[in-house]
Image: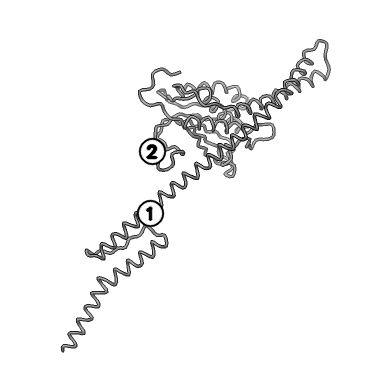
């Protein structure tokens, strides 16, 4: 009888040992292996109020800390990669700018000579025949080349912005008015949507107008068969790409330009801000417009976001920091 009781006690002790020690330890072992394999979202699921339960809670807490650290490191790595890409882009722009300045200087003088000589032929009294037409053609093509050189110089000599308080609604409307003849030539209706109100930002008016003009012209030229170009302005809270995911949102004014063109291929999107990159035909563009606009907006602490779908059109959003409340006193 004594042996039977001892055997039963042994079986009970083994069962209790397995239930209260063996089973939770196996769960902790499995959880440790899962963490080692990279699974930081699971739980030990040990519900005991003893040392083993405390150990399970510590393992879960460690898993949470590892997950948070992993997320933070991923965000920091992404921010570092973005910063390195921006630095490479800036270095590339500097190199291209120097090259552009040299090319513009070397070509500018001879082109002026050619244009002036052609002008004298056209203005010569008594001149006639095909020579006059040839001279006019030379003038026109020289003027086109001079315009390209002027773009190169603008690209290479961009200075820092001279900030002043400006109403972006007024500035955008003025830019659209300047481009109305071009829009009419392409049979494009440009529509501005911006409720009356305080759309103020501290910007360099001339530079921002140039950036807006470049983007709007791109939209117009993207619709060779005509259409509608929608321009809108709205206030928003946004997170700057420069700040990274750990930054905080701030008030911005977003100017969005939506065209109904053919859109941009996904393979081309990463390159649209690169100098001289263009999908237009030969002689239809220098590929500097968006690059210049990108540089101007970046100099203002903003950024440009582009969304495009082939066959449906492109939307370009320009983000500029809104003027702080209480600073709007006098604005142009």
Judge the density around disc 2: few (<14), some (14-19), many (≥20) Cα neighbours within 10 Å: few
Label ID, residue 165: none
Q: Which quadrant: the N terminus?
A: bottom left
Point 37% across, 55% down: residue: 66
Residue 47 vs residue 310, the one in the foreground = 47
Residue 285, percent from left and from top: 65, 31
Question: Which quadrant would residue 181 be assigned to in this image?
Answer: top right
Between discs 1 and 2, the one toward the N terminus = 1
Point 46% across, 47% down: residue: 77
Residue 262, percent from left and from top: 59, 38
In this figure, which residue is indicated by the disc labeled 2? 248
Label ID, residue 67: 1
Point 21% across, 78% down: residue: 12
Q: Name the colour scheme.
A: one colour
Residue 67, percent from left and from top: 38, 54
In the rendered image, the residue lying farthest to the left is 1
Secondary structure at badge 1 equals helix
Point 59% across, 34% down: residue: 94
Question: Which quadrant would residue 311 be assigned to in this image?
Answer: top right
Judge the density around disc 1: few (<14), some (14-19), many (≥20) Cα neighbours within 10 Å: some
In the image, 98: left or right of 79? right
- For the residues labelled 1 and 2, the Cα–Cα distance comes to 21 Å
């Amino acid at each position: 009888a004594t042996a039977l009781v001892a055997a039963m006690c042994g079986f009970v002790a083994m069962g209790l040992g397995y239930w209260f020690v063996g089973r939770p330890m196996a769960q902790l072992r499995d959880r440790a292996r899962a963490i080692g394999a990279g699974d930081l979202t699971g739980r030990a699921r040990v519900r005991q109020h003893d040392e083993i339960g405390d150990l399970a809670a510590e393992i879960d807490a460690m898993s949470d800390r590892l997950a948070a650290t992993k997320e933070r490191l991923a965000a920091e790595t992404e921010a570092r990669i973005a910063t390195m890409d921006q630095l490479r882009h800036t270095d590339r722009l500097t190199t291209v700018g120097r090259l552009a300045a040299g090319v513009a200087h070397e070509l500018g003088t001879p082109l002026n000579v050619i244009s002036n000589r052609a002008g004298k032929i056209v203005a010569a009294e008594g001149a006639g025949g095909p020579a006059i037409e040839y001279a006019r053609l030379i003038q026109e093509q020289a003027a086109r080349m001079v315009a390209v050189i002027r773009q190169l110089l603008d690209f290479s000599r961009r200075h820092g912005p001279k900030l002043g308080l400006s109403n972006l609604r007024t500035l955008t409307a003025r830019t659209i008015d300047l481009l109305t003849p071009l829009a009419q030539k392409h049979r494009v209706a440009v529509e501005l949507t911006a409720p009356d109100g305080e759309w103020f930002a501290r910007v360099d008016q001339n530079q921002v107008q140039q950036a807006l003009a470049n983007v709007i012209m791109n939209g117009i030229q993207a619709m060779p068969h005509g259409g509608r170009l929608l321009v809108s302005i709205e206030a928003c809270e946004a997170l700057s790409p420069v700040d990274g995911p750990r930054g905080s949102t701030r008030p911005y004014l977003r100017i969005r330009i939506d065209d109904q063109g053919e859109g941009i291929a996904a393979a081309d999107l990463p390159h649209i801000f690169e100098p001289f990159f263009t999908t237009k035909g030969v002689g239809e563009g220098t590929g500097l417009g968006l690059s210049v606009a990108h540089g101007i907006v970046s100099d203002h602490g903003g950024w440009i976001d582009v969304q495009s779908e082939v066959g449906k059109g492109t939307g370009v959003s320009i983000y500029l920091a809104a003027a702080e409340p209480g600073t709007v006193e006098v604005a142009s």
